[in-house]
Structure formats: structure tokens, C-alpha cells
Amino acid sequence: MSISAVISAIIGGSLIGLVAALLLFTHNRVAGISGIAAGILPPWNNESPWRASFLTGMLLSVPLYRSLLGEIPLELSASLPVLAIAGLLVGYGSRLGGGCTSGHGICGIARLSTRSIVATLVFMLAAGLVVFGVRHGF
């Protein structure tokens, strides 16, 4: 792994932690993306504006990064239908699990939430089993 990849990971992780802490301290809300995204769907309420702003900021971070640092190396080998099905499964799983990996893994563990610790362990175990199965033909 190159030093630039390590520095990029440190900066990215620090920014995610900073934003999660700011959202918690300013709005008393957890930075779980599935919950934030679900909160902008109808029926709207008084929390919809900050949720929309949060998601807009996430989307605008990509062109900002590209304008400052250039292209983002990205290689996708899956087709669009496979990506769409995967996205739907992730969305379903995050609602079934009471949150997504960012909410449980970053914010929940930081708050020492037993539910989040268990959920993150299950996410990681399932991911490891899927990778093992795919790589070994199961």
C-alpha cells in the first residue's frame, strides 16, 4: 500500500469521524446514511431539510474531490443490473438490520451501543463468508 493511500485513508476517516461528531453534537442525530436517506422520503417533516443537506453534501463531495485532486481511480466489473440488485439488497438489509454499516460501525460502536457492536460483527462475518465463498467457488 502506498503512502498516499494511507494518508488518504487517514484524512477520509478523520473527516467521516468529524462529520459524525458534528451531526451528533449539533442535531443529536447519528450519521447513519440509510436512516438519513429514509428521512427525506414522504411524509416530510421538520428534519427533512438537514437530511437533504447532508445527502447533498455527500453527493457534492465527489466533484469537489475531482476538481481538487483529479480523477478517482474506480474499476467496476459488475454490470448495471447487478449493481442495481446489490443496491436494493443493501437497502433492504440496512432497514432489516435497523441501520447501515456507517450508522452501526462508526457511530454506534463509538457510543458503545451493544446493538451496534453485534450488528457490525454480523456485517463483518457475513462479508467475510461471502468473500471466502466467492473466491473459493461456493
Image (cartoon, helix red, strand yellow):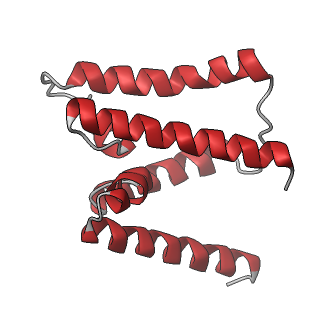
Instruction: Say which of 99 and 134 sits in front.
Output: 99
Residue for point 22% across, 23% down: 48
Q: Is residue 28 above or below residue 46?
A: below
Q: Report if residue 39 is visible in the image.
A: no
Would residue 85 appear left or right of 11 to someone viewing this image? left
Look at 66% across and 80% down and name the residue there.
133
Which residue is painted at 42% across and 34% down in the image? 19
Would residue 134 be seen by someone viewing this image from the given angle?
A: yes
Q: Is residue 11 left or right of residue 42?
A: right
Percent across and percent down for residue 128 are 59, 76
Apparent side of residue 112 relative to residue 133 in the rendered image (left or right): left
Looking at the image, is 68 positioned above or below residue 96? above
Q: Residue furthest top?
A: 67
Residue 75: percent from left, percent from top: 79, 44
In the foreground, 132 or 117 = 117
Within the image, what quadrant is residue 122 found in?
bottom left
The image quadrant that residue 90 belongs to is bottom left
Q: Residue at x 77, y 23 (%)?
A: 69
The correct choice, above or below, for 59 with respect to 2 in the image is: above
Q: As rendered, which of 30 and 131 lies closer to the eye? A: 30
Residue 70: image location, x then y, percent? 80, 22
Which residue extends farthest right? 2
Q: Quadrant of the N terminus?
A: bottom right
Picture layout, residue 117 above or below residue 93: below
